[in-house]
Image (tube, rainbow, N blue to C red):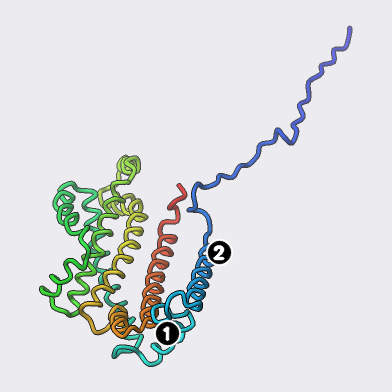
Amino acid sequence: MSDVIETRDIVVKTEADQPKTVSLQGYGAGQSNTLVISLATAVVLIATWWLVAKLGVVPRLFLPTPQEVVTQIVAVYRDGYAGASLGEHVSASLFRIATAAAIAIAVGIPLGLLMGLNRWAKGILDTPIEFYWPLPPLAYLPLMIIWLGIGETSKVTLLVLAMFAPICLSAQAGVRSLPIERVNAARSLGGRPWQLLLSIVLPSALPEILTGIRIALGIGWGTLVAAELIASNRGIGYMIMSASQFLATDVVFVGIGIIAACAFAFSAAVRLLEATLVPWKGKS
């Protein structure tokens, strides 16, 4: 009786056969940090501005140096300009833009959602919005002054009209881009219409809405300055207009810088809100 010895092949996994973890990389510049590039660009632009002004390529009357603009900022902050302090000019402009933005958001988002959900609402509201939306706000500014006077009401109404359309249309676009699978899944689980609106429709449309708000704020700042140029005695636009009449180019640059800083702060606030409310944007 012979012994039978069974041998089996022993498979040894080499390091090359081990599974590897692969990290997925994003496409485009959306996931990359561009802070260093932006700061370097700002430094280059300021250095170019200083060099051009210092070499006299453009007369100093039309292009002051950065040092002169900074000096003028301190002077305007200390002594005021055009019959008001710098704080009064800035607060007047901020009050107008904030009030108009609050009204445009409060009215534009519900109407935009309604237009995206109901064809009757879209059919009724789409025509007047598409009619006045391409018009520059300065085209109907005289009409606002004739109807509402030269007080704050005409300026705020003009800003509301300028900011309402992008917010409303972005809310409508957010609803129309909603995947129908989410709605059907919620309906199959017994979701009621108001639950669908609050839990499915609004969160899905929120990225588009916040983008529309950012666009509307940019349009609002441009419209605000134009309105203050024509009919106002306070505000950043009025300060710029008064300075331009006396060829005070450094004060004009001060006003432009204040507008840019305020607009950047508003945009940064919306970006922060976007990162808090819709952290999934761009990661799906």
- Residue 92 in sight: no
Residue on which disc 1 sits: 73
Q: How many marks?
A: 2
Query: Is 278 displayed left or right of 168 in the figure?
Result: right
Choose top left, top right, bottom left or bottom right for residue 268: bottom left
Which one is closest to the eye, mark 2 or mark 1?
1
Residue 253, position as x, y percentages in the image = 39, 78
What secondary structure is found at the residue carrying circle 1?
A: helix
Q: Amino acid at mark 2?
A: Val
Residue under numbered circle 2 = 36
Amino acid residing under circle 1: Ile
Q: Quadrant of residue 98?
A: bottom left
Q: Is residue 207 left or right of residue 32?
A: left
Q: Position of residue 19 (x, y in %)?
A: 66, 36
Mark 1 burial class by Cα count in 10 Å: few <14, some 14-19, many 20+: many
Q: Residue at x 30, y 63 (%)?
A: 216
Query: Residue drawn at (26%, 69%), measured in percent from left and top?
Result: 223
- Judging depth in this view, the residue of 81 and 90 nearest the camera is 81
In-front residue for pair 78/203: 78
